[in-house]
Amino acid sequence: MSNDAKQRAGASASDSEDEEDVFHDARFPADEETRLLEESRSIKAEANKLFSAASYDEAITCYDRALASCPNYLDYEVAVLRSNMAACYLKLEDWKASVDSATACIDRLDKVLPPTPAAAADSQKGNNGAETAAEEAVVEITGDNEDAEEEQLKRLQQLDQTKRDVMRIRAKALMRRARARMQLGGWANLQGAEEDYKELAAMDNLPPDDRRVVQKGLRELPAKINQAREKDMAEMMGKLKDLGNGILKPFGLSTENFKFVQDPKTGGYSMNFQSG
C-alpha cells in the first residue's frame, strides 16, 4: 500500500473513531428524553408488580423492556434497573446472572458518584473517616446575592440527595452480589464476597438485618476462603498431574517421578526428580 493510501486509511479510521465518540456521547433532546424516561419508569412499575407477585421471569423481561426505553446515558436509572434484575435472579437462584447484574449496577453508580480511594481508606480508620466526611460536608455558599445563594443551596441539597440515593442502591447491589457470590462458592467468588462485605461494613446506611448478615459473613468467610483455596489448588494440581502424565508417558515417565514440596513460608512449590 502506498504512503498516500495509508494516510487516507488512517484518516478514515480516525474519522470513524470520532463518529463513534460522537454517537456514544449523543443525547436526546430534552422533551424526547423526558418521554423515554417516563415510558421506562412506567414499565419499571409494571415489573415491580410482577416481582411482588413472585413472577420473576416475567419481571426480568419487563425490566429489560424498561432498559430498552431508558436513555443509556442516564446511569442512575440504568443502575436501579440492573439492581432490580439482580434481585430477580437471586429469587431464581441464578447466581451468576445475579452477580453480573449487580456488577453492572455498581459500574453505573461509579459513573454517577465515582468512588474515592482516600475516603474509603479513611472509613477503615474509624473516627478519622467521620472527621473527613464532616470536613467535606462543610461547603461555603459563595453567591453574590440572595437569589444566587438560594440557587446554590438547592444544587447542594440536590447533590446530597443524589449521594444518598446512590449509596442506598449501591448497598442493595453489594448485598445481592455478595449473597450470589457466597452461593456460587469457590476461592475467587468467596474472596469477592468478602470484599463486598468489607465495603458494606464501612457504610452507615445499612438496615440492622443487613448489618447482621455482613458481620456474620465477615466472621465466617476467612475459614471458607482458606478451605476453597486448598480445594482449588488440589484440583489444579490434579489436572496438571493428568496433563503431565500424558506428556511424559511416551518417555516412560510419569509425574510420580517428580516430587512437589511446598515451602511453608511462601506457599510455593519446588520440584525434585526421582528415578523409578
Image (tube, helix red, strand yellow):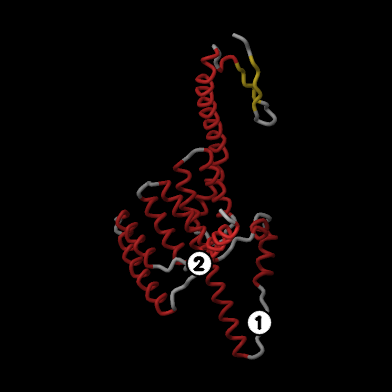
Q: Earlier in the sequence, mark 1 or mark 2?
A: 2
Residue 268: image x %, image y %?
65, 29
Per the image, the residue denoted by label 1 is 141
Which residue reaches farthest top? Answer: 276
Residue 212: image x %, image y %?
51, 51
Residue 160: image x %, image y %?
56, 72
> Number of numbered discs present?
2
Residue sitting at x 54%, y 33%: 227
Q: Nearer the viewer, residue 250 or 7?
A: 7
Residue 21: image x %, image y %?
52, 66
Residue type, mark 1 in image: Ile
**Foreground tag (1 vs 2):** 2
Mark 1, other Cα within 10 Å: few <14 / some 14–19 / many ≥20? few
Dot 1 falls on a residue whose secondary structure is loop
Residue type, mark 2 in image: Glu
Tell me where residue 3 sits by quadrant: bottom right
Residue sitting at x 53%, y 29%: 236
Per the image, the residue denoted by label 2 is 19
